[in-house]
Image (tube, rainbow, N blue to C red):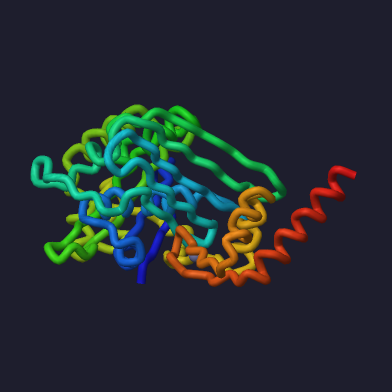
Amino acid sequence: MDILLKGMAKEEPLLVVGLVDTETVEKARSIHDTYPTASAAFGRVISGAILLSSILKEGQRVILQVVGDGPLRGIVAEADWLCRVRGYVKRPHIHLGLKDGKLDVGRAIGKGFLNVAKDLGLREYYHGNVPLQTGEIATDLAYYFRVSEQIPAAVSLGVYVDIDNSVKASGGFMVHALPGVSDETIEYLEERLKGLLPVSSMVLNGLGPKEIMEEAIGLPVEILERRDVLYYCPCNKDRVLDAIVALGEKDMEDIAHKGENVNVQCQFCKTEYAISQEELLSLLFKAMDLNKQTEG
Ligand SMILES: [Zn+2]
């Protein structure tokens, strides 16, 4: 079972979040058939979205998008306040050579941007956008927190891909320095984080989220919240039909004129929905009707 824990350092104003999400990232890999470098990048973006979701309120949702000029082109992951996550990779069949014995995520992503969109409910949205610093995701996310949300933060993410291409370990942690933190604590943390084992190794060694959190800051942590993490896609046929309507009358007519049934695939979970000719035509008539009403 994948778990996210949120806690506070017992004696310092530090918010700490720990995550083990090996099963979730392995599920994402198998759905999208990603190759190792793509799996590592995708897994980090998924874990990043889950860490971001830990500071959401009930009913809220966050979308983390990484766009770069490297071969992967782009990765999207969205997570809700219950740590249910889904995502996709533009080009899943990417595998590059290793760099210093590690999967070269930075090169696979390249130069570009990290975008964060939050659906805060009641039609309220928040958007933040920063240029990628390294394309390794964790440093980019820490940069995003500092620049866009004015939160001094440390983020670490790690995915270990096995020789058979499956995801053997995935996890992460995040430390937010809250107001009132001393300079000494920040200096101590910076030094400590430099010497840490990669988080993928911690997960491989069997550490759980609480142990990862305490390892990260070297201080005892009091747990405030625990959430199960899950790859989950809420798509259904009605939503797929809505998406077709959103294409507009012209595109719908083109599809309908082909005179065939169409299969539409959800890009997040690869579920196929068969749309019959009758369904297409009735959607088209409904759309034309709606347009008349708005024009009239
Ligand atoms: Zn789906």
Image quadrant holding the N terminus, namely: bottom left
- Across and down, in percent, residue 17 comes to 39, 52
Total number of numbered discs in the rendering: 0
At 24% from the left edge and 54% from the top edge, which residue is drawn? 159
Relative to residue 5, is residue 219 drawn left or right?
Answer: left
Quarter residue 99 falls in: top left
Image quadrant holding the C terminus, namely: top right
Q: In the image shown, does 16 or 262 lie closer to the viewer?
A: 262
Quarter residue 201 falls in: bottom left
- The answer to whether one can see residue 181 in this image is no
Relative to residue 269, is residue 203 drawn left or right?
Answer: left
At 48% from the left edge and 53% from the top edge, which residue is drawn? 78
Relative to residue 39, is residue 230 drawn left or right?
Answer: right
Q: In the image shown, does 276 or 96 lie closer to the viewer?
A: 276
- The answer to whether one can see residue 61 in this image is yes
Q: In the image shown, does 258 or 201 lie closer to the viewer?
A: 258
- Across and down, in percent, residue 85 comes to 45, 59
Relative to residue 62, is residue 105 drawn left or right?
Answer: left
- Across and down, in percent, residue 69 comes to 32, 33
Residue sticking out furthest to the right: 296
